[in-house]
Amino acid sequence: MFLRALGGVGLLHQLQSYTEPDEDECWTQEEVEAAAEVLRSDSAATDDDGEDVREDAERLQGLVFSYWHGAAESLHQAQSILASFPWLEDWSQRALWAKEEFLETLRAQVALFVESAGLLVAAAAATMERPRLSGEDPAFAVLGSSEKVSTALNALWRRWQRAAESSWVGSPARSYMSHYLVQDIRSNRKGHDEALAGAARLIDSWEAQARALAASADGKSTQQVSVRLPEATDETARGGRGGLLEGLDSWTQGVVATWVVGADWGRRTLTLDVPALVAERLHAPSSDVACEPPREEVNAIEPSRTPDDRPSSIRPGVFDDTPVFDRQPVTAEHIHALRTFTRSSDELYIVISASGGVEVLPLDVVERRLGQGWSGVLVAGASDLPESLIGTWAQTARSEPEASGSHWTGGCSDAHDLHFGEEFGGTDGERQTLRRTYFDAHRARNLRLLALTRGVHDLRTLDAGRERMLPLAVWEGTLASDRLDLAPFKQPGGDRWHRGSGLPLGPLAVAQIYTTNADPQTDGKGHSPLCRHARERGVAANDDLLTVTDLLARDDFDWCGKCGGYAVRRLTDTQVSFYRAAHRLHAITGQLDRGRSHDDADTVVSQLEELAAWQPIDEEGWYTSDSWRWHEAIRNLKRRVERARRHEIS
Ligand SMILES: [Zn+2]
Ligand SMILES: [Zn+2]
């Protein structure tokens, strides 16, 4: 369980990625230096061959940044996993070093693209107060009333400040912004050009002010700032790249690349040594990162991990492949760790406890029980079930022909047909599960889950909440959607066409019936857990569990007309076989009752003898009070056949 969790998107993967340059996408230090030089110069040059060197440089810049993002996120993942599995630290140390080294190489290359002077100007721009912008300036008359002019100028200012403070690029990159002021004015309109020129003048003055502020600030002395990066959203993390750094604006990225002096990527904490102006901007509420008080003393001893926020360590022997004999009880921390570090925990686990024996449970139920003091060991997850078993099963279940297709949809009405009752059986269950599994990749998984559900005493224990419910395809394989025909087991009486045969339920007595509501006193009709009215949710913890015996004993149920009110848990082979036998006997009784059997007496007698020999599959015989009633019913029928035969002869 555990090793696979580490293997997928987990630790092994993280440890192996971003340790060295990619073979397909590699570049040299010289290329990076040249590209940075091109981007630093203002010329939009083409080289001798007419290639757009600027475009190439930008492409390389994007690539270097994206690798830097990916490497940081990967190191973050690896270190945060290791924080919970500390016994793996030694083993993974070499890989971590390689990752750190590669990340540092990338950082240095990223820093080449970043202009630290530009970072200072941006920080200065961020500190600038909004200037007084007069609406009376005649240059902007084309915009309308002085109120409109003032609104437009203020909007331009905000736009400029946001752009200026969130990047390191110089003022030429922002000269285009003057156009925003006149974007709604036709360019041939009188006054348009004056307004445009006025906007450019304003922006120039703001740029100049920012540069002056940056120049007058003390750029030499620095201070340490400890910042915490925001957690990557699921979306960016799932993409495999990006994450932590990608979400930051380019100014913050530039600051990190330029001035980082220490990092605990596991905790997303960076120590930066920055000029005062930059520190001020980092501390501002608008900053992309949260500042923390410096914690150098802690850093010196152990990378920024204090005893109280150290994640409880997850010892081996729970999720790993330790021999079952040596397994350790699962704890809430284990489950939390499994959920946090893998996106692929199994839906069902085989667990063993002294109190409950061997059970199959969803992780949520295990977690809830742990809260109540339960103690148990995980034996295996659904995905641990031997491939030799599941693989073969998936093959045979797939190739099963649907020869007698009509039988599973409506069931077969001729009790003497070999397929009679098959729609309630397990083989039909497999078929339904596969039929409702729309992705090939899920076939084996759903069959694994189906196999695990089959030994569960009470399917209600599998309810892990709506979000984590078992796939509907698995429920279709576990429950039958057709209604049982219990006529053979009803008491004789009523009209001669619909009377029961009073046969014993035999192995069917304990067959399980699941319904959303079996109590007529409770509001609402009973539905099958597969019914659309029950939102096709599978069996839930608060469903009612009946047996076929209950079904037969009561007639006060209030069932849904669409689904019939309940779902039968799929019958065992013995139960299907007995269901068929009872219906055959019932059919023979019906023929005799109506006094017209199209089969001759010898055929009927031999059928009765065959039915008398019924016994549970894989057992030596059938000796219960039910078997006595079964044989009694057959003896009665035989006597009736003999009597009719004598009557015909005489
Ligand atoms: Zn048939
Ligand atoms: Zn219903």
Image: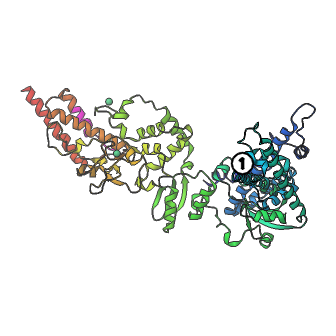
- Residue plotted at (75% across, 57% down): 92
Q: What amino acid is found at the position of numbered circle 1 in the picture?
A: Arg
Q: Quadrant of the C terminus?
A: top left
Residue to which mark 1 is pinned: 241
In percent of width and height, residue 256 lies at 80, 58
Residue 376, magenta (yes or no): no
Compare residues 523 and 461 and report the one nearer the observer.
523
Figure quarter occupied by ligand 1: top left
- Residue plotted at (79% across, 61% down): 128
In percent of width and height, residue 449 lies at 50, 47
- SS type, badge 1: loop
The colouring scheme, among rainbow, by chain, secondary structure or one colour, is: rainbow
**Residue 184 appears left or right of 426:** right
In percent of width and height, residue 591 lies at 18, 32
Which residue extends farthest left? Answer: 650
**Residue 6 appears left or right of 392:** right
505 over 417 or under it: above or below = below
The residue stretch that appears in magenta: 605-617
